[in-house]
Amino acid sequence: MTRYFRLLLFLCFSLNSAAAEIDLVKVDKSKRRMYLISGQQIIQEYRIALGKEPKGHKQQEGDQRTPEGRYYLEAISNDSGYYRSIHISYPNHQDKVHAQRLNINPGGDIKIHGLKNGDKQRPEYVKSFDWTNGCIALTNSEMDEFLSLVKEGTPIEIEW
């Protein structure tokens, strides 16, 4: 009987976590962490890799920075140079206006993605340093989990 009670308790907690609707993705670049939030509760936390120049807001194409601000998760892609990805809505209107004032290209194509296709490094290794061109990287198994928990249109806040 105790065994069945434990199983029932486990299933209730598992279903509660899985059924929680993620209403915000929060990225703390300074800690290299990404949090999936439902209401005020952190549902999941990931160790992430960022752009090669992580400190500061992305200013222009090629600066190797991960943008900072409020954006939205857009289209999911299973066909890119990386294992699965979801596009982030950078640049937003404010980014475009700023870039236009400076007469620079703000860049784009910022995503959350898995490892580079064909990469043979251990997942722990590629999360031990910042290696992207401005994207946010997870391991492939984390990317599968992440995409099972979030929806297109979910807001993402990225800050230092």
Image: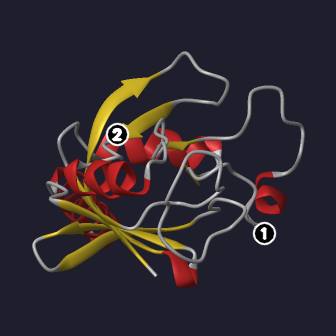
Label 2 neighbour load within 10 Å: few <14, some 14-19, many 20+: few
Circles 2, 1 touching at the beta carbon (< 8 Å): no
Quarter holding residue 16 = bottom left
Sooner in the amino-acid sequence: mark 2 or mark 1? 1
Report the residue at 57% width, 45% height from top: 61
Q: Vertically, is 39 above or below 93?
A: below
- Residue 39 bears which disc, if any? none
How far apart in space, not on screen, are marks 2 and 1 (Cα)?
24 Å
Q: Vertically, is 153 above or below 12?
A: above
Report the residue at 62% width, 61% height from top: 50
On screen, residue 47 versus residue 94, left or right, reads right
- x, y percentage for residue 1? 26, 67
Q: Amino acid at mark 1?
A: Ser
Q: Residue furthest right?
A: 120
Q: Nearer the viewer, mark 2 or mark 1?
A: 1
Total label count?
2
- Residue 148 bears which disc, if any? 2
Q: Residue furthest top?
A: 79
On screen, residue 103 versus residue 41, left or right, reads right
- x, y percentage for residue 102? 42, 57
On the image, numbered disc 1 is attached to which residue? 128
Out of 29 and 3, give the one closest to the viewer: 29
For mark 2, give the secondary structure: helix
Out of 38 and 5, give the one closest to the viewer: 38
On screen, residue 146 versus residue 78, left or right, reads left
Q: Amino acid at mark 2?
A: Ser
For mark 1, give the secondary structure: loop
Report the residue at 46% width, 82% height from top: 160
Report the residue at 66% width, 48% height from top: 133
Out of 43 and 134, give the one closest to the viewer: 134
The type of colouring in the image is secondary structure
Label 1 neighbour load within 10 Å: few <14, some 14-19, many 20+: few
